[in-house]
Amino acid sequence: MALTKVDTSMVESSGAFGRRNILINGDFGIYQRAQQITGIGANASTYYTADRWKMDMGGSNSGRVTMTAGTEDAPTESNVTTSLKLACTTADTSIGAGEYFILVQQIEGFNLQQFKKGTSGAKQFTVSFFVKGNGSATYVVELYDNDNGRQISKTFAVTSSWSKVELTFPADTTGAFGNDANASLNVAIWLHAGSDYTGGTLNSSAWAAQTPANRAAGISSFMSSTSNELYITAVQLEVGDTATEFEILSYPERLALCQRYFQIFKGFGTSSAVMNHHNRTTTQRYGCLNLPVSTRISPTLGYSSLSDFISFVASTSATPTAIVNQGSTGHSIEIYITTAANGTAGQAGWLRVANGGYLTLDAEL
């Protein structure tokens, strides 16, 4: 049988193959918590909208920000359709020395070993993204090594039109990333800072032990006016000195990557079942919630309000007085529920959440 020659003229012969982007949710299209949060203020360091992206805000900052994930505004050349929008709603023109406002994604050590940091074969880091604002501004991207207290920063410019930013950071042969599930690297976008972080000279040429004043020197202040806006999308971190096109993953893949760190179980329609349980006593119920994705660590359980839940046993129901994480393997979580007395020991039942209520499992870095 004759062999057919394969045409390889259209096959890429150089560059990165396989999974390239080490960041998760770089197009800000996954937002399990909320799409928009207003009034984000001082000393707020938490996840508000887009999964995996934390707003870190501290000091005496009197500015306030609205954060909107999944905004349908993105440049055609980015290959994505959504972005993150930040809007200053209260200005802060008297900047305290210890103020800062940072958009950051923390990355666990397991996902960073390909950089070979701390070895003689250490690799370069390249960060790329698309960005626009309401006018001209200068901000900073910082790579911060949590394991060794080392960092490096580079500035980037923003205009009123979409532009692509490509920043290559040198390899670092000092200080290896931990090969574990803990936070090893922060990719931080500095948008506002006081003199404690801007009073020195930007450390932009080589990794070094962090000096606070050198981390964000030269940046503009996002809090300078309530006219200030920032759109950002297609954020990518990859090995090497070349920024490739933003890596497109399917929605199920992107959601699953986010669910390693955070999962939410919501009610749909009138109500929805959360899990089955059984009565240990008339007031104690135990159930096992199997998770769609294994969490990074045993998660912290949260919920909207106990009044949003109903525990059914046979033909009776009761509102829980407590819902507690009894332990987790990462693959599943054992949940303990207490209620007023109803049913009998050994009976089976189920936990239901009403429309608008939710149960959360948080394993964030």
Image (cartoon, rainbow, N blue to C red):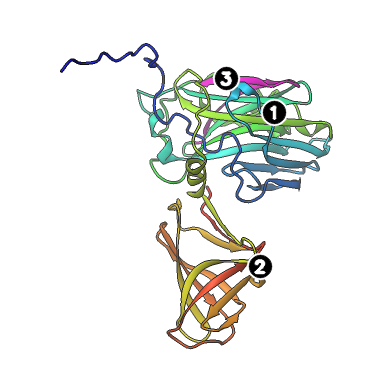
- Find the distance from the CA under tag 1 to the CA under tag 3: 22 Å
Give how far apart the Cα atoms at labels 1 and 2 are.
43 Å
Q: Are marks 1 and 2 in contact (CB under 8 Å)?
A: no
114 above or below 69?
above
Q: Dot 1, how many residues are within 10 Å of its Cα: few (below 14), some (14-19), or many (20+)?
A: many
Left or right side of 41 for 344:
left
Segment colored magenta: 149-169
Q: Amino acid at mark 3?
A: Glu
Give the distance between the C-alpha atoms of the residues marked 2 and 3, in whole angstroms: 45 Å
Residue at 44% of width from left, 21% of height from top?
A: 240
Q: Which of pointers 1 and 2 lies earlier in the amino acid sequence?
A: 1
In this rendering, does residue 219 appear at all? no
Q: Residue at x 59, y 84 (%)?
A: 340
Query: How many residues crowd mark 3 within 10 Å: few (<14), some (14–19), many (20+)?
Result: some
Q: Residue furthest front?
A: 1
Under mark 1, the amino acid is: Thr
Q: Which mark is residue 166?
A: 3
Q: Is residue 166 magenta?
A: yes
Question: Who is closer to the viewer here, 354 or 93?
Answer: 354
Which sits in the foreground, 333 or 141? 333
Q: Residue furthest top?
A: 9
Q: Amino acid at mark 2?
A: Ser
Task: Pick whichever of labels 1 and 3 is earlier in the sequence.
Answer: 3
Residue at numbered disc 2: 305
User: Comparing marks 1 and 2, which lies closer to the viewer?
Assistant: 2
Q: Disc 1 marks which residue? A: 198
